[in-house]
Image: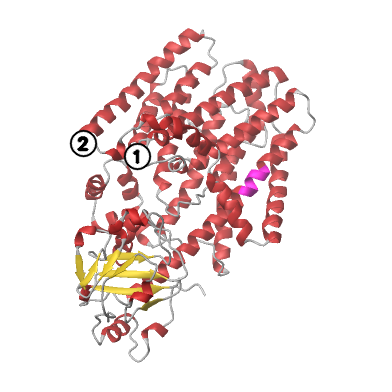
Amino acid sequence: MRSLFPKMQPEANSHVEVEKAISRGPLTVKKCLGIIVGCWLINLSVLLVLQLCHQNFGFKVWPMGEDRVWISLLQNNHGADVARAFWHLNDRNPLSPWWYMAVSPIIMSSEFGIYLVRKMVDPILAAVTFALLDKIGGAKHRAFCLATAVLILFWNFSYFYIEQIMWNFLMALTCTLLTVLCYQQFLEQGRRQSIFQALSLVLYFISFTSYTLQSGAVGANFVLALTQQTGEPLSQKFKNACVDAFPFLALLGIYLLTWTTASKPVVDYYHIHLERIKDQFIASVWNFVWQNDYSNFFMAMSREWTPVALYGLFVLLSVVAFFFLNRALKDRVSENLESETKSTGTFLVNLFALILAVGLPTILVESTSHLWLPGTRVRMIGQFVSPCLFACVILSVSQILQRFNFRFTRQVMALSFSVLFSAAVLMGFQYNKMLVTQTAFERRLAQGLRWYILPGQAHRYFVVRLDHCNWNVSQYLLDMFVETAFNLGNLHLRIIPDYLPDHIENHPHWFITVNERGVKHAAIDFGHGFIPWNQVIFLSFDGQRIQLIDPLTADQFKGLQIKWLAKEPIHQSLTPDTFAIAKKALTGVEDEEVHDLPNPTDPH
């Protein structure tokens, strides 16, 4: 079986000459893949050095948000039971739990394991993207393919997603790209080696069963079949494309029928609202082209970085990237202008078809859903889509400039990529800083709660008032946070922000009701009713340390989401030796005040 990564087999003498020239040039496939891995290792090394220098960067990123759902599944289930528990919780993407089980030794070996898994996905996605683009470009745009792949390597950020859950969705996207890569190899072999078509079908099945929205590869395959240089008439190409597409569409259809049979009764969660297209389609397309995350990153860096550091690093990175890119593009092999323009035009058509194949299912869902609104799902594919779109624009502009014999076309192309590289690297570091800072915040909260989660104590409900700090997390995931942080069941956490959330008057159950008898809505599971005081504890957290609120009075919660019905102050029900037990159990110290103990997770 021929490798998918080496150079394509040419079909014309002119292509043979170009291929031979490229093989003698500096950019071999092996060297390009080495550059991708090298850039990845340099990026990791810089993060490690910054971490060792006690900066707010590095690898200390633990599971957050929806990551905790997966941690809970792995903590409480083994083997196939993980998949069954997941299906009971969320009856879609049936192969997703198997991805997690495959890397569970890494995830569960450390509280920072899931971030390591996420970082490992970056070079895989970048390398596969390079291999595919180089394949469909006939190796004549290798420098461009390498630049796009390295840009994808660094484009690993999302302003509103502090979770790392998108890693397996990106692996599903990688399977989509491998689907197209295998099919392109099948076409290049004159449809004679059916093993590549079989591999393409298997990878296609893996992609959409891991993430249903990764079902568009069949569209990219169809366009590749039409644009393949075989000398056949277009009608024959169309017939062959339809024949090839049939097993892919049949496989997808059979899966959808099976999913419908095995899933829970249809609810509005999956309902398609066609009437929303007129209001949401344009917004979804705009977010597909430019995500609001990027603007938010620029504003955050402007606030948090000094101008000298921000613009100095931007210029420095741009200059270094321009130096290497300009040299790489200089060695690019070109034919005469007319044939190169034609070849590049076909390459751009195929690349744009690939981008649409990856993104169109997401656009359709965002355009017709009341739950997944425009911009919410595109983040799952942004690491591939945005760099490829920007690269398409750069290549298109360079071709226009070349048609007009512009002298500095190569420099314009190199400079454009260099600016994008610099922006991607800086936004990636800003994202890492956000993750490390948020992890430190949550670890301090967990460490503070640890004093009150003790064997023999009845307190299972923890209500925490945030003082001059914010925690942007879904209330529905708070129970999962404490249960997985301590690997204990039947724990509940409610957060009271230091402001009244918008539109809370439309959701009266979000208010926590307090009276002498107990606390209502002390858990996000609103069926708990009133919880007696011996099971509830109220605490405050200022971002650094937890403190017991005692006594509780109405003034302490004025203007917050608390309905105070008690006539007298409430004294919290703690046993006299609670803190002595905590100190002895956790530190072995008996004669110090528990709140004066140093916080081992404090980065300072």
Give residue 158's position: percent from left, percent from top: 50, 49
Looking at this view, name the residue that lies furthest to the right: 407
What residue did someone put label 2 on? 262
Please determine whether, in this image, residue 241 is positioned above or below residue 458: above
Quarter of image, res 533: bottom left
In 3D space, how far apart are the residues under numbered discs 1 and 2 (Cα atoms)? 16 Å
Compare residues 446 and 522 and report the one nearer the observer.
522
Circle 1 crowding by C-alpha within 10 Å: few under 14, some 14–19, many from 20: many
**Which residue sits at x=67%, y=33%?**
25
In the picture, the disc for residue 462 is none
Q: Which residue lies furthest to the bottom in this view?
A: 591
Badge 1 amino acid: Ser
Q: Is residue 545 visible?
A: yes
Residue type of the residue flagged with mark 2: Ala
Q: Earlier in the sequence, mark 1 or mark 2?
A: 1
Q: Mark 1 points at which residue?
A: 210
Which residue is rendered at x = 63% and y = 32% of the image? 393
Whole-percent x and y of residue 481?
33, 62
Label 1: which secondary element: helix
Closer to the camera in the image, 33 or 165: 165
Residue 255 within the segment the image draws in magenta: no
Which region shows up in magenta? Answer: 418-423
> Is the stretch drawn in magenta largely helix, strand or loop?
helix
Helix or strand or loop: what does disc 2 sit on? helix
* Vertical side of 381 occupied by 246: above or below: above
Q: In this view, does 84 lie to the left or right of 364?
A: left
Which residue corresponds to the image point at 55% horizontal and 68% vertical from the top-left? 52
Residue 225 on image: x %, y %: 48, 18
In terms of image quadrants, where is residue 487?
bottom left
